[in-house]
Image (cartoon, grey):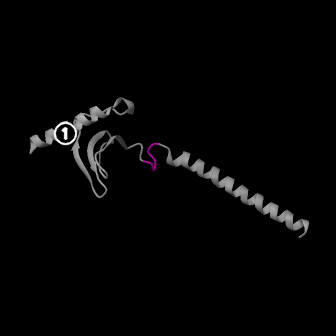
Amino acid sequence: MGSSDVFSIILALLGTIGVIVLTYYGSRWYIERFIKRPGSLSGEHHMKVIERLIVGKNGSIIIVDIQGVQYLVGVTEHNIQILSQLDEPISYQKKQEISKESFLSMVKSFSQKEKQNE
């Protein structure tokens, strides 16, 4: 094996490492530019999950804000169903302020309203 063979192997190795590094930084740039931007493919601009309560092994109740209108949604492994549209929107700017007790009381009040409407 001559010195030119070793040089060509090292050059090929450096080229491969360069392509990997460029691919890494190119993909980071793409994610920051297009994916993380509000209103992009991630859907952060038009739809937000306000709160989620797991009610069983495969089910949960979610409050979703879609362009300023909030819905109470039931989600299972095989079904997604809108349970109610909220009359009074819930503030979701600070997620820590919404406690589980307030969410549970809202769910109970909606279930009582549904029973009264039947």
Check disc 1 and report the residue beneath it.
110
Residue 40 is a magenta residue: yes
Residue 36 is a magenta residue: no
Report the front residue among 32 and 61: 61
| Residue farthest to the front, as pictured | 57
User: Percent x, y for residue 28?
Assistant: 59, 48
| Main secondary structure along the magenta-highlighted residues | loop
User: Percent x, y for residue 40?
Assistant: 46, 47
Residue 33 to residue 20: above or below: above
Residue 94 visible in the picture: no
State which region is magenta: 38-42
The tally of labels here is 1
User: Percent x, y for residue 17?
Assistant: 72, 56
Residue 118 to residue 6: above or below: above
At horizontal 50% and vertical 48% (from top left) the residue drawn is 35
At horizontal 41% and vertical 47% (from top left) the residue drawn is 43
Which amino acid, by three-letter code, is at mark 1?
Phe
Name the element at disc 1. Answer: helix
The image quadrant of residue 117 is top left
Q: Quadrant of the N terminus?
A: bottom right
User: Percent x, y for residue 75?
Assistant: 29, 51
| Residue farthest to the bottom, as pictured | 1
Residue 66 is left or right of residue 42, and the answer is left
Residue 95 is left or right of residue 34, and the answer is left
